Image: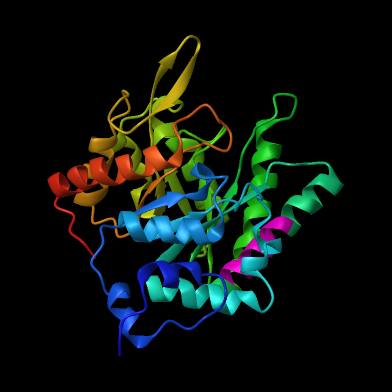
Amino acid sequence: MALVPRRSFLASLGAGLVAPASLRARADRKRLPIAFSTLGCPAWSFERVLAEADRLGYAAIELRGIEGDMDLPKRPELSGSRLRGTRRDLEALGLRVACLGASARMHEKAPAVRAKQLEEGRRFVDLAHALGVPYVRMFGDAIPKHEPRAEVLLRIVEGFQEMAGRAKAAGVTVLIESHGDFTRSADLEAVLTRVGSDAFALLWDAHHTFVAGQESPADTYARLGRHVRHTHLKDSKPADTDRRYVLLGAGEVPVRQQVKVLASAGYAGYYCLEWEKKWHPELEDPETAFPHYATVMAGYLAEAGVKTE
């Protein structure tokens, strides 16, 4: 059977077409365990996300919005009759969805707001189950200064317990990200331990634990490594009173060391770029950031002894 031209095949993505058997060879192509979050390409269509991930040699994508729309369960590519076609498209290209990024915040107290957060969490867990995605990221997020810390932590733990219960029944794992007021290992460990579910684990945003938590990669992993299932990696440098995200290797975040810590511990997940173009439109475009990350990360992974999968 003759191969379908690559351009024609990629143009058919999202249409729910079954890829010819001869294209399955591409699904078997060896790739490094790298991923990017769609937070970095808010203007791209879903079809372009898949095409660029494939072209650049990424093994996975993290879905955090499509075309700037953050409500993934309502996206046409991820709902109704098109969902099955999307799964076929991913399989044909040999790509995986590493994680779904929800915005659900477990610290919220006001009943109506909290109900909305929990409902979002449930919808994302259901989508992960339908799409065959192992993880859904949610936030502990904040410790409001006007509330007793113990009360907020209890509310966060209870929220994650509810989310983990639904996730376990769906064959999915909920991840708390090291983010917001939860960038120190001790705080994250307290939540992880108190939730106490094998359907609840950690998304290690290694930038935040280094910059905001002021912890070395080795110290963070020593305390939390057994909980890490997914990562966010990125570089930055000081800018006035704040920081600016920069291309990998151009800042002062020890990403090379973070990779070595993960690899030496036998981490089996993806080394995922979270390029926050959605929130910081002044950053370099994904056409620059994504290939740069793939190239530099390939060097870091080679140094750490990580091979293609």
Q: What secondary structure prevails in the magenta region?
A: helix
Number of numbered tags placed on the structure image: 0
Q: Decide whether residue 138 is among the magenta residues.
A: no
- Residue 193's x, y, as percent? 50, 51
Residue found farthest to the bottom: 1
**Residue 58 in sight here:** no
- Residue 62's x, y, as percent? 48, 55
Residue found farthest to the top: 240
Task: State the residue in front, 92 or 3.
Answer: 3
Q: Decide whether residue 127 is among the magenta residues.
A: yes
- Residue at image position (30%, 73%) is 26
- Looking at the image, residue 207 lies above or below residue 18: above
**In the rendered view, does 46 fall on the left or right side of 302?**
right
Q: Quadrant of the C terminus?
A: bottom left
Q: Quadrant of residue 118?
A: bottom right
Q: Quadrant of the N terminus?
A: bottom left
- Looking at the image, residue 211 lies above or below residue 165: above
Residue found farthest to the right: 112
- Residue 28's x, y, as percent? 27, 75
- Looking at the image, residue 28 lies above or below residue 1: above
- Residue 86's x, y, as percent? 54, 72
Q: Which residues are magenta?
A: 120-129
**Residue 176 in sight here:** yes
